[in-house]
Amino acid sequence: MAVCCSRMPAARFKLSLFLLAFWLGVGCERKPDQIPPVPSPAVVVVAKPGDPVGLDPANVTDLESLQICRSLYDTLVQYEPDSTRIMPALAESWERSSDGLEVTFHLRRGVVFHDGTPLTASDVKANYERQRDPEHPLRSAGDTFFYWNDTWGDRIESIDVLDEHTICFRFNEPIAPLMQNFAMPFFGIVSPRALKKYGSDYFRNPVGTGPYKFENWVPGDRLTLVKHQESWRGEPAVERVTFLSIPDSTARALRLRKGSVHIATALSPQSVESLRRQPSVKVVEQPGLNVAFLALNNQSTKLADSRVRKAIWHAVDRGALVRGLYYGLADQTDTALPTGVWGREETGSRPFDVAKGRALMEEAGYSTDRRLQLGLWYMAVPRSYLPEPKATAEAIARMLEEIYVTVDLEPVDWGVYLDRVGRGEHEMALAGWIGDHGDPDNYFSFIFGSANIDQVVGGTNVLFYTNSEVDRLIAEARREIDQAKRIESYRSLQETIFEDAPWLPLAHARQVVGVHPLLQGFHLHPTGVLVLDELRWGEP
């Protein structure tokens, strides 16, 4: 059931935010904790806000799933633990042709799946052909392969197995972020034999080559992995990793302080400063490659008028949201690209200006007597880019009241959120994107490219925004190898998107994870993935 927000004067609302922040950040201080004991045997418990959607890497897009898939699967190449630079993984070496149309991978020898079968080049081909070929026998009902179309589409001309450990990919056009694409987790190599055995239930019975293998999953409670003793990386030092689903961020933080969990993700920003002062917690922080935004459904007749969309920009005090709900752990933004990603442009000025927003709405035909009613969805669990989705939605709703917009708020369960928003069932929805490899193409193509609109199974363009010039610039930049020329394309692209105002970008949030102070070898990757390969317990 939708919940219509009540009205509250802006000044009173901002004061309430301040008092809440003061009470949470100062009023509840306790004396410092003791360092919790190291568990024996060597296990690690991870507290996360929600369950994974699934464990088939080709069919997931959410961080809760990908954070677990990272430990189950390997890609041909991978990112370094703390950056998006490429390093060997299942492929120990490769050669790329001078024209960029061919790459040959040489696979490691001795790699085995969790079921004990050896990895071959034919297994790699089966994984890619499964997504590429609509008639492939390893496809199952419900397969979506969200990332395939935009990452590869019809740009792969052929995939040839040259011998048991050598495979060659040929393309019909250059792809600038080619190696970064191969490292994306959606192309983790799964066991073809397990796909055949489990069919549409594979997402609950994963078999990869990663450092940990699947043991069991109790939905809504816990998911457990055990070490893969034959991992090509070497046997992990940790026997078992258990992921607990704990929706409440305060509960996650308290259990971390007490030592019943050893890693806690998606911590609420207001708790971070207090946690920094506790000897029982080590706070790990990363700038992140994310962007949080308000998705405006451009196919909705209510939002088809650009004056309405621009009025929403002017009405929302994004600076207040960053200060009041991110507690300084985010940067306000006007573009998709996070600070530090090359190609980022400060495209223009559309500041917080309620009077300007109200004037635009009046031009569009709205007034006190003729208000616009819009639904606003928000996810029922926090995300790394939106640590307080409910409070953010409520704040935006109150701000829009000032420009003749009445907002109906509706929380939506995370398990169906991406599917429903991806199909365009929303009018407005809180959303976010976490860059998969730090190349601008990964942001513009997936968020704004019309090829990523899919009202049947759901796409990543949740704005339902189409602009032929934007599509042309995206394709042009992806084919271009010269980075200077790509920057020019991305400059034009950002200017066009800013003028169209198909969305409301909010912030780039810093990623924060709490860790037991004696747990070593943990990496929080810029993409938000948890790198657990090298986990080990230190001496008390």
Image (tube, helix red, strand yellow):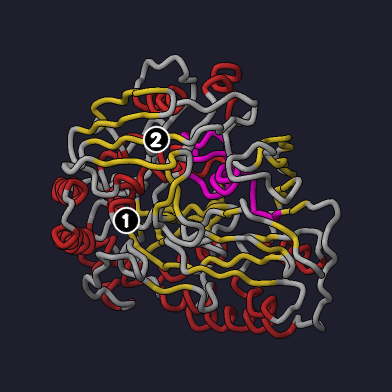
Residue at x-position 82% and y-position 70%: 540
Comparing 443 with 535, the one in front is 535
Q: Would residue 451 appear left or right of 123 to someone viewing this image?
A: left
Picture coordinates of residue 314, whole percent (x, y): 31, 72
Name the one closer to the observer, 299 or 102.
102
Q: Which residues are magenta?
A: 46-74
The quadrant holding residue 497 is bottom left
Q: Residue, x 42% and y 32% (percent of image)?
A: 145
Visible residue check, residue 95: yes
Identify the disc placed on residue 106. 2
Badge 1: residue crowd in 10 Å (few <14, some 14–19, many ≥20): some
Asked if residue 18 is positioned above or below residue 397 in the image, the reply reads below
Crowd around label 2: few <14 · some 14–19 · many ≥20 (10 Å)? many
Front label number (2 vs 1): 2
Q: Which residue is mark 1?
A: 439
Q: Position of residue 521 (x, y in %)?
A: 64, 61
